[in-house]
């Protein structure tokens, strides 16, 4: 998921896992749209065979979708998708943070700045999210919920303010943590909320067994990159890629 700090109707189709031999691809609606799918390879691997991608595209077409976006992937993962007719939409910075016990020590008084997020917070969270990101990356209610279901465990924290001015969603899968989302209302930037949210994410991840945290953000989001670097993240050499293609009855 994209993280940053620049600070319809519901589709009946639910996310499903499509199996092609030992390969798996998760398919769901992209931002609750009934014409556009979201395609996520599972589990993480170097690359899917093109046959598995073609099978997923056939399934997408059978469900009535006419286009699809992929999840953010490494260049190696993206290569067979290019072979299957996908085009590059956007590249993203990938950053990693090696976690240690030092991140588990909260700063004095910081705990009082955040609290557990609730469903009642969704309207305020989505309002500030729309101000923090451009249209393509904005969360709707379904994509916010998807970000929390993307990993076996997650943490959803918001600022202890009225209204909510910032939040983060962080996922945990084994020894890897994924900062799925960090957003701060533009009028609340420069007050330390971004750092408080990221450090809360890292402390929770470490205490629950993660040893590496991952985050991605837009190449143009220099403010987010600076925040992550201040909190211990390092830019990876490779960038992630989000791809797109239209779908018809004969995707091959």
Image (tube, rainbow, N blue to C red):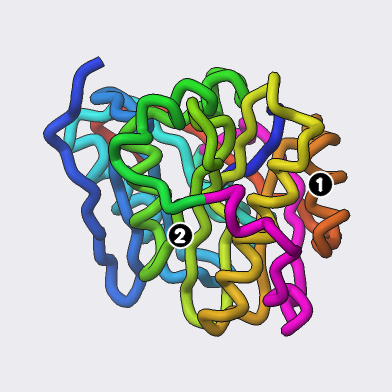
Task: Tell me the crowding category of disc 1: few under 14, some 14 to 19, or many 20 or more residues within 10 angstroms, Cα based.
Answer: some
Point out the stretch of residues depicted in magenta.
86-114
Q: In the image, is 80 to the left or to the right of 6?
A: left
Q: Residue at x 55, y 66 (%)?
A: 47
**Residue 62 drawn above or below residue 94:** above
Q: Is residue 98 magenta?
A: yes
Q: Quadrant of the C terminus?
A: top left
Q: List x then y, in percent, for residue 150.
A: 39, 58
Q: Along the polypeptide, which appears first: circle 2 or circle 1? A: 2
Q: Nearer the viewer, residue 79 or 26?
A: 26
Q: Residue at x 55, y 47 (%)?
A: 168
Which SS class for mark 2?
Answer: strand
* Residue 247 appearing in the image: no
Q: List x then y, in percent, for residue 59.
A: 23, 45
**Residue 150 drawn above or below residue 131:** below
Q: List x then y, in percent, for residue 28.
A: 29, 43
**Residue located beneath label 1 in the image:** 227
Residue 5: which quarter of the image? top right
Q: In the image, is 31 to the left or to the right of 92?
A: left
**Contact (Cβ within 8 Å) of mark 2 with mark 1:** no
Q: Is residue 189 magenta?
A: no
Q: Nearer the viewer, residue 49 or 178?
A: 178
**Residue located beneath label 2 in the image:** 155
Q: Residue at x 50, y 44 (%)?
A: 158
């Amino acid at each position: 998921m994209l993280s940053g700090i620049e600070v319809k109707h519901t589709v009946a189709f639910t996310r499903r896992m499509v199996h092609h031999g030992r390969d798996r691809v998760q398919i769901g609606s992209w931002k609750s749209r009934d014409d556009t799918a979201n395609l996520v390879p599972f589990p993480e691997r170097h690359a899917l065979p093109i046959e598995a991608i073609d099978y997923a595209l056939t399934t997408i077409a059978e469900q009535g979708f006419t286009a699809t976006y992929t999840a953010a992937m490494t260049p190696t993962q993206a290569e067979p998708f290019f072979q299957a007719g996908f085009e590059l939409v956007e590249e993203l910075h990938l950053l990693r943070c090696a976690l240690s016990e030092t991140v588990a020590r909260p700063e004095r008084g910081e705990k009082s700045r955040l609290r557990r997020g609730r469903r009642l917070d969704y309207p305020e969270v989505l309002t500030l999210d729309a101000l923090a990101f451009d249209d393509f990356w904005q969360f709707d209610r379904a994509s916010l919920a998807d970000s929390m279901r993307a990993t076996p465990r997650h943490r959803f924290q918001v600022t202890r303010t009225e209204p909510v001015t910032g939040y983060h969603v962080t996922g945990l899968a084994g020894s890897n943590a994924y900062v799925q989302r960090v957003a701060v209302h533009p009028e609340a930037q420069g007050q330390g909320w971004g750092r408080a949210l990221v450090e809360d994410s890292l402390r929770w991840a470490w205490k629950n067994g993660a040893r590496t945290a991952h985050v991605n953000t837009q190449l143009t989001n220099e403010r987010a990159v600076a925040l992550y670097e201040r909190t211990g993240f390092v830019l990876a050499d490779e960038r992630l890629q989000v791809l797109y293609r239209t779908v018809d009855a004969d995707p091959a």
